[in-house]
């Protein structure tokens, strides 16, 4: 039996306090009817005796203390699911907004999910080809991984995400689908994603969740949870391989901060709540593969680093949870290099077990290692050149500088080209071949024999 | 007033019970109809505060809170090794059987398998007097480890009766003890111990032996003692977990307790699969035979994360009491500190630095002080070594957890982002790291690693130091203007950095290097240096010496010389002599 309550005790930001509630349940869903009859949704976030603190997703504007009716629904926030969610567009709370009608659910699942038992996980090994050299070769994306893109405002992270979706989907012919969750993104950005998916002919395999920047922020806290619940359903119940794109995690964390401060919680760093790490982890850790399911959940969260600062709490805590990161570089972006991937801080922790013989090619690990270490030397040489001038550099350093330029131009700057893994690796060797053999200290002799092909002096003359 | 305790308020993992209760501080309780595990963390006149170790979604006020009368305890007995537990010692494989791939709520499973039969040998006879910690039986827990079953440190008395040797379950009675007051106590294969109280020992002994890890930068430059404590701070991507895994795989402790505290689920899966595939070089048995994993991943309840560190150290102390050398890897202690902060915030305590509670330093010191080289109650020698990873916020080592950890550990392996970016692993920065154990371990190295070991080490250190000050100049004006003797320093330091300090965890030979080979490598590098120094003094430019390829050859020797073919070093010496003879005889 559902009891209806009338009146509120207190309204504060997005929170309302109900009094005299019989047996409220922690995290229980609440339906709120305003004076003029419109309905809103909320959830109980804290309980004290017969008082329940309810977070209202749509905001409290227009609520009155006396004439508001509330009903406790007796279950936590759930998402209705069925195979027909593919191709549909939902709002931040998982309600269809594409005008195609309600979902007839096969089942409902708690949006908070449950932690995967570490012993039930399968260690991710199968790589996903994105067709982008800098990612495929140097920070390989693995199925079941969470690999965020650290970007900044104004950089081309959305284009990169679309390119990954387009190219990765072509590479993978089995059951592959995309769950896309927008949190606080602008209307036109959301429209860009939608039209890009339609143009690439993948819309039928996309589930979209849109919480736009003018939507209530409290809803934003639920959006990724709905998206991940849908992803888990598609992956573990229907056996599909799911790529989840969450953008923009910075807006999400900011919503969390706003919400925490209305609750009067003690802030930790930069005003973010002390549980920001646990909260982010409860999203990111939902990526993975489990033993008795066919599918997998791979995540690419995108976040814009405030002021391009990688030590800001949001990228910092994200980096501690995710299995690597792809960092975009404003310098490269300014030079028109696309995708503007910053090589040195980008990293995929799981790549070592998903590349090499049987997955990509036997020389991949050594090659990637060598390119990294040479690229680090490029930075040293550049720093030195900026002090003493490039002409004064030693011969080796000059060669390194030339290598660095070519690397940026040919390897990183690939535009919309879709490269196979062989093309990417061969290109890497072509660049290594511009350098003398003695500088290749990270590659095995047998690969040097097989792939190292210096082409006379032509490449060195240009310097 | 009802005698039953009922939930009054719920706020995340913290709940309160109103009214006076008979609950005691730190008592373990079951919360709600689902019987979620919780612990009393605050008692006031009319409010009792409890932190819950499981997800509180769906909990209602008015649900009962059941008292257990004991503190949060772990079960200690055979069956712990090779297992994987969550933060409150619930075996994860058993949880999987109960609730499938996702962790359910309120599942009560025994910590150690209660059905398995152990081959027990009883070591006492009726009439024997036993004091706390005495061994009364033993069983082969894994092929590598003999499990000694000890009397709880709190008990003592006379053995009244014993069962014959044979197969028993952990809960079977195998002896009866009559204590001083005449009460009879039934002795089984297991005992309970509260996780927040250090297990007693007879005496703390000085540390004299290193924990040999097979990692050159650690063993040679910054060794940690058995019974010592070390910290590995580093931002994300600098290889904390990788270093911890390497230590867990190769260090010469008898027992490894690996605590994944608030870290990634996939990493724990990796540890699980890798450790079961690897063979311990010393015992020839799988590494899992000596390993316990505790996995409390970042999305598992935060209160259990706080407990996982204590669960881990208690298990380590238990095996120490049997006379084993144990090492506990805690990855990462920052997550534990953050769990403290989160719970402290929910209790509305006054925050200190960065929102951390003011008692953070005292909690950290309590934890690190549980390390030590001890004489156990039964007269054996055992040790607990703690290696704690720290994940500083924003890679800034001045934050509270790193700073306070530094005060209570004597070994500091600072991981460096610049090194990690250059894929120099392990990315332990030789300029900012330190080990205070060098002095205490000197004699051991002299006797066991070779009389020259420490001499070579200090020469290596001074070369690296010299290089780093030279690099300051090079950064400003380039390497070409340096005099040749300084160029030589830079060249040889490169060999030390790339050929010696950098170590490839994925290479079959290089992943673990015995001390003997470490010494040989240092000796040959220094031999080349000394010979070249003589030549440079004769005005021969360094570039000619580099052109001999000897430097490159030494850089690659870590791959070329297998760990069991140390005789090959002689051929290196010969080659150096041959190639340099032209210059030397000038």
Image (tube, rainbow, N blue to C red):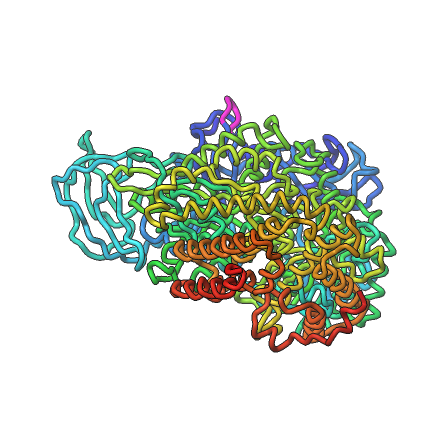
Q: Is B423 in the magenta?
A: no
Residue closest to the eye, B243 or A158: B243
Residue closest to the eye, B51 or B144: B144
B348 w.r.t. A300: above or below: above
Residue B283 screen position, x and y as percent? 33, 59
* Residue furthest top as drawn: B45
Residue B455 screen position, x and y as percent? 43, 45
Splitting the image into 4 quarters, where does residue A381 fall? bottom right
Left or right of B230, for residue B469: right
Left or right of A350, for residue A158: right
Residue A218 screen position, x and y as percent? 75, 44
* Residue furthest front as drawn: B586
Left or right of B114, for residue B44: right
Q: Which region shows up in magenta? A: B43-48
Q: Is residue B302 visible?
A: no
A247 w.r.t. B234: above or below: below
Residue at point 80%, 41% (across, down) = A34
Residue at point 60%, 76% (across, down) = A449
B212 w.r.t. B200: above or below: below
Q: Is B45 in the magenta?
A: yes
Residue closest to the eye, B277 or A234: B277
- Total of numbered circles in the picture? 0
* Residue furthest right as drawn: A188
* Residue furthest left as drawn: B127
Q: Is residue B257 visible?
A: yes
B79 w.r.t. A130: above or below: above
Residue B323 screen position, x and y as percent? 29, 45
Residue at point 34%, 35% (across, down) = B206
Splitting the image into 4 quarters, where does residue B350 fall? top right
Left or right of B110, for residue B9: right
């Amino acid at each position: 039996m559902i009891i209806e309550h009338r009146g509120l005790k207190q309204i504060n930001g997005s929170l309302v306090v109900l009094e005299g509630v019989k047996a409220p349940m922690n995290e229980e869903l609440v339906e709120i009817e305003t004076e003029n009859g419109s309905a809103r949704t909320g959830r109980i976030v804290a309980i004290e005796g017969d008082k329940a603190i309810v977070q209202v997703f749509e905001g409290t504007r227009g609520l009155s203390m006396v004439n508001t009716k509330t009903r406790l629904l007796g279950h936590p926030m759930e998402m209705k699911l069925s195979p027909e969610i593919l191709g549909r567009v939902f709002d931040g709370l998982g309600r269809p907004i594409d005008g195609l009608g309600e979902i007839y659910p096969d089942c409902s699942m708690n949006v908070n999910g449950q932690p995967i038992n570490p012993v039930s996980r399968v260690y991710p090994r199968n790589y996903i080809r994105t067709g982008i050299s800098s990612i495929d070769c140097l920070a390989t994306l693995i199925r079941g991984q969470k690999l965020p893109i650290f970007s900044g405002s104004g950089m081309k992270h959305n284009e990169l995400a679309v390119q990954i979706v387009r190219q990765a989907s072509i590479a993978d012919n089995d059951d592959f689908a995309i769950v896309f969750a927008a949190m606080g993104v602008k209307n036109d950005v959301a429209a860009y994603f939608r039209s890009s998916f339609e143009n690439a002919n993948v819309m039928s395999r996309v589930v979209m969740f849109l919480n736009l920047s003018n939507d209530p922020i409290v809803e934003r806290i639920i959006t990724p949870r709905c998206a991940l619940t849908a992803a888990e359903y598609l992956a573990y119940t229907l056996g599909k391989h799911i790529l989840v794109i969450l953008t923009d995690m910075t807006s999400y964390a900011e919503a969390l901060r706003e919400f925490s401060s209305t609750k009067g919680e003690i802030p930790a760093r930069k005003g973010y709540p002390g549980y920001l790490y646990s909260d982010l982890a409860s999203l990111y850790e939902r990526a993975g593969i489990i033993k008795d399911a066919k599918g997998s959940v791979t995540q690419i969260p995108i976040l814009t680093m405030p002021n391009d600062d990688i030590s800001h709490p949001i990228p910092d805590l994200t980096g501690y949870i995710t299995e690597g990161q792809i960092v975009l570089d404003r310098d490269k972006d300014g030079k028109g290099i696309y995708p503007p991937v910053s090589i040195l801080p980008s990293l995929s922790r799981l790549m070592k077990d998903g590349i090499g013989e049987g997955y990509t090619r036997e020389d991949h690990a050594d090659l990637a290692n060598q390119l990294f270490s040479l690229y680090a030397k490029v930075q040293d040489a550049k720093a030195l050149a900026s002090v003493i001038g490039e002409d004064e550099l030693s011969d080796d350093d000059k060669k390194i500088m030339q290598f660095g330029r070519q690397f940026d131009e040919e390897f990183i700057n690939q535009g919309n080209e879709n490269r196979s893994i062989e093309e990417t690796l061969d290109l890497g060797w072509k660049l290594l071949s511009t350098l003398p053999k003695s500088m290749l200290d990270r590659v095995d002799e047998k690969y040097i024999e097989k792939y190292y092909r210096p082409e006379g002096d032509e490449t060195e003359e240009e310097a | 007033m009802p005698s039953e305790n009922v939930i009054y308020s719920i706020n995340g993992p913290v709940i309160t019970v109103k009214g006076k209760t008979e609950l005691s501080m730190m008592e373990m309780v079951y919360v709600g109809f689902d019987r979620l595990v919780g612990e009393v963390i605050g008692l006031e006149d009319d409010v009792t505060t409890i932190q819950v170790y499981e997800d509180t979604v769906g909990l209602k006020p008015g649900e009962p809170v059941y008292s257990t009368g004991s503190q949060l305890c772990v079960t200690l007995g055979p069956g712990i090794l090779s297992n994987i537990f969550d933060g409150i010692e619930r075996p994860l494989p058993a949880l999987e059987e109960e609730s499938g791939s996702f962790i359910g709520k309120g599942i009560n499973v025994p910590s150690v398998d209660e059905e398995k039969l152990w081959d027990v040998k009883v070591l006492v006879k009726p009439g024997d007097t036993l004091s706390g910690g005495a061994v009364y039986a033993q069983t082969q827990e894994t092929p590598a480890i003999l499990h000694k079953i000890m009397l709880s440190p709190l008990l003592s008395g006379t053995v009244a009766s014993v069962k014959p040797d044979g197969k028993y379950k952990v809960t079977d009675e195998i002896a009866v003890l009559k204590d001083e007051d005449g009460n009879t106590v039934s002795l089984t294969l297991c005992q309970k111990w509260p996780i927040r109280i250090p297990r007693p020992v007879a005496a703390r002994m000085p540390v004299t032996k290193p924990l040999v890890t097979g990692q050159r930068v650690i063993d040679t430059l910054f060794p940690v003692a058995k019974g010592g404590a070390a910290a590995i701070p580093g931002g994300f991507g600098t290889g904390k977990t990788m270093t911890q895994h390497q230590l867990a795989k190769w260090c010469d402790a008898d027992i490894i307790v690996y605590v994944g505290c608030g870290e990634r689920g996939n990493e724990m899966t990796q540890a699980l699969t890798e450790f079961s595939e690897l063979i311990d070089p010393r015992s020839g048995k799988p590494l899992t035979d000596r390993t316990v994993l505790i996995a409390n991943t970042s999305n598992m309840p935060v209160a259990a994360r706080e407990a996982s560190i204590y669960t881990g150290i208690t298990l380590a102390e238990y095996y120490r009491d049997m006379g084993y050398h144990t090492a506990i890897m805690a990855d990462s202690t920052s997550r534990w500190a953050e769990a403290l902060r989160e719970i402290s915030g929910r209790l509305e305590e006054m925050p200190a630095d960065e929102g951390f509670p003011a008692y953070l330093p005292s909690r950290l010191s309590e934890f690190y002080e549980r390390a030590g080289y001890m004489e156990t109650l039964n007269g054996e020698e055992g040790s607990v070594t703690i290696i704690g990873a720290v994940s500083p916020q924003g890679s800034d080592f001045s934050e509270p957890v790193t700073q306070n950890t530094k005060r209570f550990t004597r070994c500091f392996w600072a991981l460096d982002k610049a090194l990690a970016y250059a894929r120099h692993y392990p990315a332990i920065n030789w300029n900012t790291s330190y080990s205070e154990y060098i002095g205490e371990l000197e004699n051991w190295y002299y006797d066991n690693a070779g009389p020259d070991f420490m001499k070579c080490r200090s020469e290596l250190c001074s070369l690296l130091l010299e290089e780093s000050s030279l690099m300051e100049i090079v950064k400003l004006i380039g390497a070409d203007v340096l005099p040749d003797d300084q160029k030589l320093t830079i060249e040889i330091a490169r060999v030390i950095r790339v050929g010696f300090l950098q170590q490839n965890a994925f290479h079959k030979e290089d992943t673990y290097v015995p001390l003997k080979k470490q010494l040989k490598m240092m000796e040959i590098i220094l031999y080349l240096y000394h010979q070249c120094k003589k030549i440079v003094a004769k005005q021969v430019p360094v570039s000619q010496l580099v052109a001999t390829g000897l430097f490159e050859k030494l850089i690659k020797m870590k791959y070329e010389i297998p760990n069991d073919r140390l005789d090959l070093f002689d051929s290196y010496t010969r080659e150096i002599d041959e190639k340099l003879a032209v210059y030397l005889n000038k």
